[in-house]
Image (cartoon, helix red, strand yellow):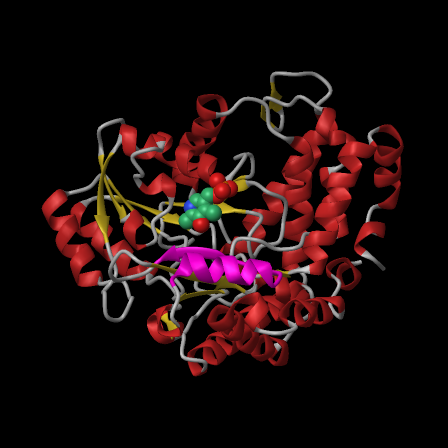
Amino acid sequence: MSVATAYPSQLDALRRQDPEMAEVILAELRRQADSLQLIAAENFTSPAVLAALGSPLANKYAEGYPGARHHGGCELVDTAERIAIGRAEGLFGAEHANVQPHSGSSAVLAAYAALLRPGDTVLAMGLRYGGHLTHGAPVNFSGRWFDFVGYGVDPETGLIDYGRVEELAGVYRPKAIVCGSISYPRHIDYAAFRDIADDVGAYLIADAAHPIGLVAGGAAPTPVPYADVVCATTHKVLRGPRGGMILCGERYAERIDRAVFPFTQGGAQMHTIAAKGVAFGEAAAPGFAVYAHQVVANARALARTLAAEGVHVTTEGTDTHLITADTAPLGVDGATARGRLAAAGVVLDTCVLPYGEERGIRLGTAAVTTQGMREAEMERIGHLVASVVREGADGARGARDDVRELVGRFPPYATLS
Ligand SMILES: *Cc1c(COP(=O)(O)O)cnc(C)c1O
């Protein structure tokens, strides 16, 4: 089945009414299938998730929570949200789940709103080392409304220095400690963070936006028993619709719910909540554990190949879906590497590196693994990435064709339907 036939009836209707927009959507479908998706935060949702997203639940206003809405006619969307909540709680062994946050950032905003007051001190990974915008960026609400102190990673090993985190916690006595990153390739020691938080009487907020899908598949340790509040996205390795989620214990449930609605959001997006429920259902099936472990095996194979090609892989490997690497040994910085790769049809991001100001590249294996690629393909991708970074898309002769040939054998919507 081709990508374009994954949800044909909706597309046909759109094409008839609005060919201009339909063409953009079709072109984007083609782009996703025709190039190599190595952006670590992306994945391919299933046709079932897309069907829920494109459903008439998009029409429904539903402020509030199941059984306590501010609008009439919510009986059926209440059922949809209860299903999604129950599946999330079961999947992650959490006492309470809130599935309404519109995004990962909205989830973090609500967690801060539930536990903190403006002006409070928060200890989080510095942006310079892989912290997210919501971990104290001056251009973000977090940096404006809270007093953030940043911890880093060891410049040599690239690993979190837990001794240093403990020291900073002792000096600054934060009200909350945030663990989680956009580019940390290793497992986070949640028990160590819990101990540090307990020592200074701080809340522990785990921002598990990236690894939560691996957690669902049993391929990464869970923050749920350790953190007071776990924030997550549903669209990264977890492979659901674009959105956020919060997990917590019973004691914070009411505060979290009120922090999402009515404090930071209005009406819930019921089509997205239904799609989250579908994704949680998929993630609870045995096949998802196989998927999550293959994602990690693939990332390790890709990291090994890149290292063998002379790329400097941060932390000398990965525990997760995510790899960060310095391309300087191949003669170019991260931004140049990304540009050369884009010209060859390889799509990825730049990222911070543990040392200096130069940027590296960040790669992830969630999407290519959904397509069905395995270690052999990762080795091929590693060699291809290195040769394109070294020589440019023109220098690495046939690179664009190689990418086309490879992805052509793994159409994203054929393996999922
Ligand atoms: C992706 C991510 C987010 C935010 O997700 P959005 O849905 O883009 O708002 C927050 N924190 C971390 C650590 C992330 O990786």
- Asked if residue 144 can be seen in this view, the reply is yes
Q: Quadrant of the N terminus?
A: bottom right
Name the outermost residue toward the left. 171
Name the outermost residue toward the bottom. 308
> Is 406 drawn above or below residue 212 in the view shown?
below
Q: Quadrant of the C terminus?
A: bottom right
On the image, the x and y values in percent for residue 64 come to: 57, 23
Q: Between residue 364 and residue 249, name the one nearer to us.
A: 364
> Is 415 drawn above or below residue 242 in the view shown?
below
The residue lying at 49 percent from left, 49 percent from top is: 94
The residue lying at 68 percent from left, 61 percent from top is: 285
Is residue 341 magenta-colored? Answer: yes
- Asked if residue 248 can be seen in this view, the reply is no
Is residue 2 magenta-colored? Answer: no
On the image, the x and y values in percent for residue 369 come to: 63, 67
- Name which quarter of the figure residue 295 lies in: bottom right
On the image, the x and y values in percent for residue 139 come to: 34, 33
Q: Which residues are magenta?
A: 333-352
